[in-house]
Image (spheres, grey):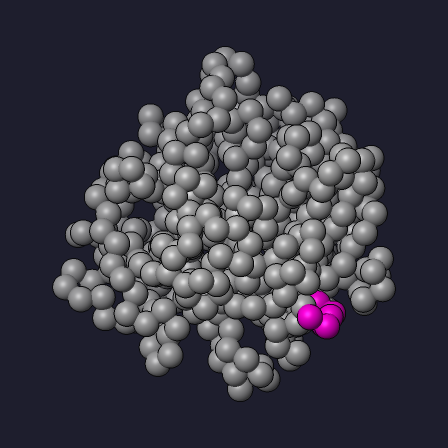
C-alpha cells in the first residue's frame, strides 16, 4: 500500500500491522472513562484524501484551519509564530472556547512570540504561548499572546483551576544563545486573564528540559516529564506543592521536587513485557535549580535513579498518571531499543506499569512509531500524536486495543520524490467533546476537527 493510500483500522492493529503490544493492563489508561463493549467500535473507517491537500480524515468529518504561522494576530501584537506544539482547550462561557497553544521556538526561530508588556520573561527569548478564543460557531474571535520571552515551549498541561502550565524544553542559562535569563522552567498562564499570571517562572518545579506535566486533581501533586534524547536521559518527577490545589499562583508557594526510582531498573528501556509492574520510590532532588549540575546528573544516593530516553506526553487518567517514552536507541546509549512506551503510575499503590510497547518488531517505515502528545478523548479512547519518520498520523486506541487512524497530515513540505510531513502535536478536545483540536507543528497550523465523534 502506498503512503498516500487510505489506511484501514485493520492494518493498524497493534498486535499485527505495527508490532505494538497491548495487555489486559490497558484498562488503566482509561481509568474513570466510560466503558464500552469491544464490539461497539472499531474506528471511523479509512482516511479520505483531502482535495485541499492539508488534512485527510474519515468520511463524515470536517476540519477548519483556525490559523497559520505568519498570519497577523487579531490583537495587533504581531504575526502568529510557528512551531505549534502543546495545547489545551478551556470553556470560555456562552459556548465559546479558549485554546492555549505553545510555540517551541529556539533562539534562531524566524517568527518569535511577540513581546508584550507584563507578559515577557526574557526579551531575548523567542518562544511562548498564544491564546485563541473561538465563538459559539467555532470561528476565531480573538488571537493574542499569552506569555512571551520564554524558550522552546514544548508541551505542558492543565491545572484543576483551569490554567495552562507551559514547559520550556531547554536548560540554557543567561548568556547562552543570547538569553538574558536562565531557562528550563514551567510557567503558569491564565488563558482568560494572562496578565494575572504574568511571566513568572515556577522555580520550585525544577530547572531542566521540561516536556509535559499532569496534575493530580485529588492530591494536587504535579507530575513532570523530562525530554532528554542524549545520555544521561531524562527523569520522571513529582512536585509536592506547599499549597496543593490552592488555585492560580499557588505553585509559586514552593514545595518539594522528587524523582522516580524503580529499584533494579536504571533505564525504563530494559522493560520489554507489557503488563510488567514495579514498585516506585521517590527520591528528593538535591538541587532543583540545577545551579551547578543538571538534575539528571546529580547524586541521588544509594540505588541511583531511573532514566528514560525521550520522556514526552503526560496526562492524568483519573486513576493515575500516564506518560510516554517516545523511543529508545541502544546506539545512543539506551539500555535497549524500542519505538515507544506508555507507562502508568498509580499513586495509591506506588507502582508503575508498562501499558504499551511500540516495537522493537515495528517496521519503522510504517506509521505508528515515536508516540508524543497523548490525551484521553471523550467516550474513553486514547488519542496519540506520532512524531516519527514518514507519514504523520493521529491514532485512536480503544479499550480493546484496536488502533484506528483519525487524521493524517497531507501537507507535503518536501517534494514528490522526497515527501516530508510535519508532526502532529497538542491534540485535545473541547470541553463538550464535540471538537478535536490538533496542531501541525510545521508549517504551523491549528485545526478544529468535527464529525460523528462517538
Eyeballing the image, is 288 above or below 317? below
| SS majority, magenta | loop
Question: Most extreme residue toward the bottom, as rendered?
Answer: 175
- State the quadrant of the N terminus: top right
Q: Position of residue 376 (x, y in %)?
A: 52, 35
Q: Residue at x 53, y 86 (%)?
A: 175
Q: How many marks?
A: 0
Eyeballing the image, is 149 above or below 308? below
- State the quadrant of the C terminus: top right
Q: Position of residue 54 (x, y in %)?
A: 75, 44
Whether residue 428 is visible here, answered yes or no, is: yes
Along the line of sight, which residue is nearer the eye, 87 or 9? 87
Q: Answer with the quarter of the image where residue 137 lies.
A: top right
Judge left or right: residue 146 versus residue 74: left
Q: Position of residue 16 (x, y in %)?
A: 43, 29
**Range covered by the magenta-colored residues:** 113-118
Whether residue 71 is visible here, answered yes or no, is: no
Q: Residue at x 58, y 52 (%)?
A: 164
Q: Residue at x 52, y 44 (%)?
A: 160
Along the line of sight, which residue is nearer the eye, 204 or 408? 204
Eyeballing the image, is 429 above or below 126? above
Q: Position of residue 394 (x, y in %)?
A: 59, 39
Eyeballing the image, is 149 above or below 158? below
Along the line of sight, which residue is nearer the eye, 297 or 391? 297
Is 166 a magenta residue? Answer: no
Q: Residue at x 55, y 24 (%)?
A: 379
Amino acid at each position: 500500500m502506498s503512503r498516500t493510500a487510505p489506511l484501514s483500522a485493520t492494518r493498524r492493529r497493534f498486535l499485527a500491522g505495527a508490532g505494538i503490544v497491548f495487555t489486559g493492563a490497558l484498562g488503566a489508561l482509561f481509568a474513570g472513562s466510560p466503558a464500552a463493549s469491544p464490539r461497539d467500535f472499531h474506528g471511523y473507517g479509512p482516511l479520505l484524501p483531502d482535495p485541499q491537500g492539508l488534512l485527510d480524515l474519515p468520511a463524515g468529518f470536517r476540519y477548519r484551519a483556525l490559523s497559520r504561522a505568519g498570519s497577523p494576530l487579531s490583537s495587533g501584537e504581531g504575526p502568529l509564530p510557528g512551531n505549534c506544539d502543546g495545547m489545551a482547550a478551556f470553556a470560555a462561557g456562552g459556548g465559546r472556547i479558549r485554546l492555549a497553544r505553545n510555540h517551541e521556538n529556539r533562539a534562531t526561530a524566524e517568527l518569535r512570540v511577540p513581546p508584550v508588556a507584563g507578559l515577557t520573561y526574557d526579551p531575548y527569548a523567542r518562544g511562548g504561548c498564544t491564546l485563541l478564543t473561538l465563538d459559539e460557531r467555532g470561528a476565531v474571535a480573538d488571537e493574542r499572546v499569552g506569555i512571551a520571552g520564554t524558550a522552546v515551549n514544548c508541551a505542558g498541561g492543565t491545572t484543576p483551576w483551569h490554567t495552562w502550565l507551559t514547559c520550556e524544553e531547554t536548560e540554557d542559562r543567561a548568556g547562552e544563545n543570547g538569553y538574558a535569563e536562565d531557562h528550563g522552567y514551567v510557567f503558569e498562564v491564565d488563558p482568560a486573564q494572562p496578565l494575572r499570571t504574568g511571566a513568572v517562572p515556577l522555580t520550585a518545579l525544577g530547572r531542566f528540559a521540561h516536556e509535559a506535566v499532569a496534575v493530580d486533581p485529588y492530591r494536587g501533586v504535579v507530575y513532570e516529564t523530562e525530554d532528554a534524547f542524549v545520555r544521561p536521559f531524562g527523569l520522571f518527577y513529582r512536585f509536592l506543592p506547599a499549597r496543593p490545589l490552592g488555585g492560580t499562583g499557588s505553585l509559586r508557594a514552593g514545595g518539594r521536587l522528587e524523582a522516580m526510582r524503580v529499584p533494579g531498573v536504571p533505564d525504563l528501556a530494559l522493560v520489554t513485557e507489557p503488563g510488567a509492574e514495579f514498585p516506585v520510590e521517590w527520591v528528593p532532588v538535591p538541587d532543583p535549580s540545577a545551579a551547578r549540575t543538571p538534575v539528571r546528573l546529580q547524586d541521588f544516593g544509594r540505588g541511583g535513579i531511573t532514566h528514560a530516553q525521550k520522556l514526552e506526553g503526560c496526562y492524568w487518567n483519573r486513576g493515575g498518571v500516564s506518560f510516554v517514552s517516545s523511543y529508545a536507541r541502544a546506539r545512543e546509549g539506551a539500555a535497549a531499543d524500542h519505538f515507544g512506551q506508555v507507562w502508568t503510575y498509580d499513586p495509591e499503590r506506588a507502582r508503575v506499569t508498562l501499558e504499551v510497547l511500540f516495537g522493537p518488531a515495528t517496521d519503522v517505515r510504517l506509521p505508528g512509531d515515536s508516540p508524543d502528545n497523548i490525551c484521553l478523548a471523550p467516550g474513553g479512547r486514547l488519542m496519540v500524536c506520532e512524531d516519527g519518520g514518514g507519514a504523520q498520523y493521529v491514532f485512536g486506541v480503544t479499550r480493546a486495543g484496536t488502533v484506528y487512524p483519525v487524521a493524517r497530515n497531507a501537507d507535503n513540505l518536501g517534494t514528490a520524490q522526497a515527501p516530508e510531513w510535519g508532526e502532529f502535536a497538542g491534540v485535545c478536545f473541547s470541553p463538550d467533546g464535540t471538537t478535536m483540536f490538533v496542531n501541525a507543528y510545521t508549517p504551523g497550523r491549528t485545526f478544529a476537527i468535527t464529525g460523528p465523534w462517538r
